[in-house]
Image (cartoon, helix red, strand yellow):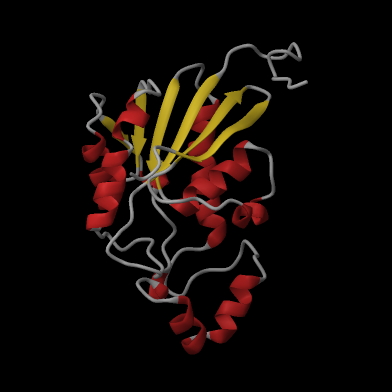
Amino acid sequence: MEQSFTQLGLHSEMMNIGLFRHGATTFVNRYVGSTDIALSAEGIAEVKRQHDFLAAQGFDTVYCSPMQRCLQTHRLLQFQEECIVDERLREIDFGDWEGRTFEEIVHSTPDLVAQWGRNTADFGFPRGENIDHFRKRVQSFCKLLQNQRGGNILILTHGGVIRHMLCHLLGLSAENYLYFKIETARLTMLQLYSEGAVLTGLNRGREDG
């Protein structure tokens, strides 16, 4: 028998949270964080396909990363609600690794890649962002959500941000972020209670065709 926080006699007020990753960009199989690039033709098409599906969810508040690919996603979805732009929703800054493939990075800086693979919070991308700083700013935005009561909130952001938000809100270690595969132009859903969160959907959306 399935149970919810409400059925267990805990806090009855619940917030619906939708995490939507922007559409595909003009950079394919390359690390893109602080680089402010636009959606590709494919990305534009896949976002447009999700218009009716997202409209049916009844979101009443929209938060958005300030990056062009997210703001463009918001415009394409044609929400009546203005988005609230929040700097904390930026993707991590990969520094010198921006715009490069994994193979290129491994070839040029194998020692740094090995350090990154150890998944420690003190790792910093060369001339980029420290992982601990990234996690803390994402957690700061999560606290904003946790301090609200009720509502149906959509957040337009990036794959890395969504992964870390899921870990924080679900009470998982941040080191588990790679367990979540976050697809472009797809919606991940949570129900947020004062006691914690429940994952209700991963990579949802209208199928192609």
Q: Quadrant of residue 49?
A: top left
Q: Is residue 96 above or below residue 57?
A: below
Could you tell me how many numbered marks the image carries? 0
The image position of residue 182, as x and y in percent, is 50, 50
Q: Is residue 88 above or below residue 201?
A: below
Residue in the foreground of this view, choosing between 95 and 192? 192
The image position of residue 109, as x and y in percent, is 51, 85
The residue sitting at the bottom extreme is 107
The image position of residue 11, as x and y in percent, is 67, 14
Give the residue displayed 27% in from the left and 59% down from the top.
36
Note whether residue 15 is visible.
Answer: yes
Q: Quadrant of residue 165?
A: top right
Q: Quadrant of residue 32?
A: bottom left
Give the residue displayed 33% in from the left and 50% down from the top.
23
Image quadrant containing the N terminus: top right
Note whether residue 67 is visible.
Answer: no
Give the residue displayed 68% in from the left and 14% down from the top.
6
The residue sitting at the front extreme is 209
Give the residue displayed 68% in from the left and 39% down from the top.
171
Residue in the foreground of this view, choosing between 167 and 205? 205
Q: Is residue 170 above or below residue 52?
A: below
Image quadrant containing the C terminus: top left
